[in-house]
Image (tube, helix red, strand yellow):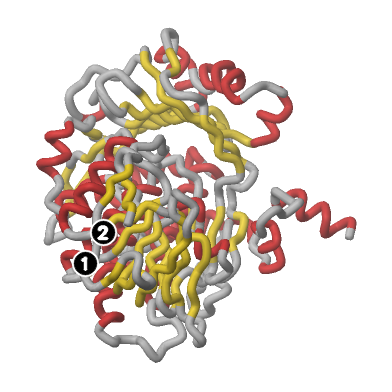
Amino acid sequence: MERRDVYGGREKSKIFFICQGFCYGLMAIKTDVLIIGGGPGGSTAAMCLIREGIKPIILEQEAFPRFHIGESMTGEAGQLLRRLDLEKLMLKKQYPVKHGVKVFGAQAVNSWFVPVSARDADWQLSTGTTWQVRRSEFDVMMLKEAERRGATVIRGTATKALLANDGAVRGVTMRRPDGTTEDIESEVVLDCSGMATFLANQRVTGPKYVGSYDKQIAFFAHVTGAVRNTGVSGEDAKDNTLIFYEKKFHWAWFIPIDDEVVSLGLVLPRATFLETKQTPEEFFRATIPEISPDLRRRLADMKLVEKVHVIPNYSYQVRRFCGKGFICIGDAHRFIDPIFSFGLSAAMREAEFAAPLVRKYLEGEGRDKSNPFAEHQVFCEKGIDNLEDMVDLFWEQPFVFATFLYYRYRDELIDAFAGRVYETERQPSMAIQKCRKLLKRTRDYDHEDDYSMPIGSRFHPERAALWEPNSPISTTEEWMVAQSTG
């Protein structure tokens, strides 16, 4: 059979008879665990499963390397890489070392810094480091490492979920690059497809809803010539993440990804862009220097080395994202405002949490339940809710948020910025609970369809139609107008 090299796109002819318990070309491919998506979430899931004695298949539709956003790691993402024995490899690759994130307020009048941190076994807080990564290189490194440790990588696109009579997910139909199709049968499917949200689009999960930031649009590119800091550690370290806040829902990011290149992003309401009638590049060049005087200074000699990419309406969540035979991980079930770079950390950590649960399921635990992973589902939702509440308070009451960070709940918010947001990490902390109180928000986890409501209770089941394929309605606001005139 033909197997396509996922790293470079070249085809290699190789005869596979029986390998790790499945057959190619003779019948449906069979495996215990199928992972859809070979990005960091999928690769982390594979490496964690291998630690549990399970060798999965990773199905990846794209040829690596490929451009991807999400380049800044939290402290806990760095710790996870260390647990996977990847620190030496990260150092060998010379990824920029991140000491923290610095946020510049409106007109750069005020700023505050949050260091990367770690907790020891006694829960003592210490400063630490993590990494910034060029995703095209990092993702290849992770996928190769997963394959080296025993995962099997197949190039192809998942096109259809395979369901058993009881509704359990039992694999997928895939389309290979040459157009042929084949089934991959599995006991468990881990959906690490990111914003493609494969299982949600297949309606295997509950519906997919617009989130709190659905009016936003993000522009991003890679640039050279940007002026970064010159320090070697702490607040002035040259490779720290910089966030520039102009006003509510208007901000930019600045993330060094190697010695020369900086990832530069701009986020603001979509209507602001549409009013200008400019191309994405024209708008990006004209608007990003206006976000902050300090950012303008840093970009005086900016040169684009990557086209300007655009993601509109990026905030969403998927209901009932775990079930019999499947777990959605990371962006495959939820994405909130990316301002503090939690996406990569959430995907990798959820993958690590899921691995031992998958092993127990394969051993027979929970097979008679309608949702064997229900506790994991709530566990993940609670963690992201903690993040969302912190981010929402930052937007709604930035002065209060800064006061909390510097004077009242500094250690607890440093924990949250590091990605320590789960119940096993003393969450929700007093800081998060105070955020909720000021937002006039409660979190009820007693009923599956009631928890994790976006800010302002903008969640309604009937809005699921917004996310149906080819929906004529693209935003919550259009939906509200349609409802009022219908």
Q: Mark 2, residues whose alpha carbon is within 10 Å: few (<14), some, or many (≥20)?
A: some
Q: Residue at x 17, y 24 (%)?
A: 232
Position of residue 224 measured from the top left corner of the image (x, y, whole percent): 37, 16
Using the image, tell me which numbered label, if any, was put on residue 19. 1
Establish if 217 lies above or below 166.
above
Q: Viewed as shown, does residue 93 lie left or right of 173?
A: left
Marks 2 & 1, CB-CB < 8 Å contact: yes
Q: Residue at x 58, y 58 (%)?
A: 454
Using the image, tell me which numbered label, if any, was put on residue 152. 2
In this rendered view, identify the residue nearer to me: 255 or 371.
371
Using the image, tell me which numbered label, if any, was put on residue 241. none
In this rendered view, identify the residue nearer to me: 23 or 374.
23
Secondary structure beneath dot 1 equals strand
Residue type pointed to by label 1: Cys
Q: Nearer the viewer, mark 2 or mark 1?
A: 1
Residue 228 sits in quarter: top left
Task: Give the CA distance from mark 2 to mark 1.
Answer: 9 Å
Is residue 343 something that shows in the picture?
Answer: yes
Position of residue 380 measured from the top left corner of the image (x, y, whole percent): 39, 65
- Residue most extreme to the right: 485
Position of residue 123 measured from the top left corner of the image (x, y, whole percent): 17, 58
Establish if 8 lies above or below 155.
above
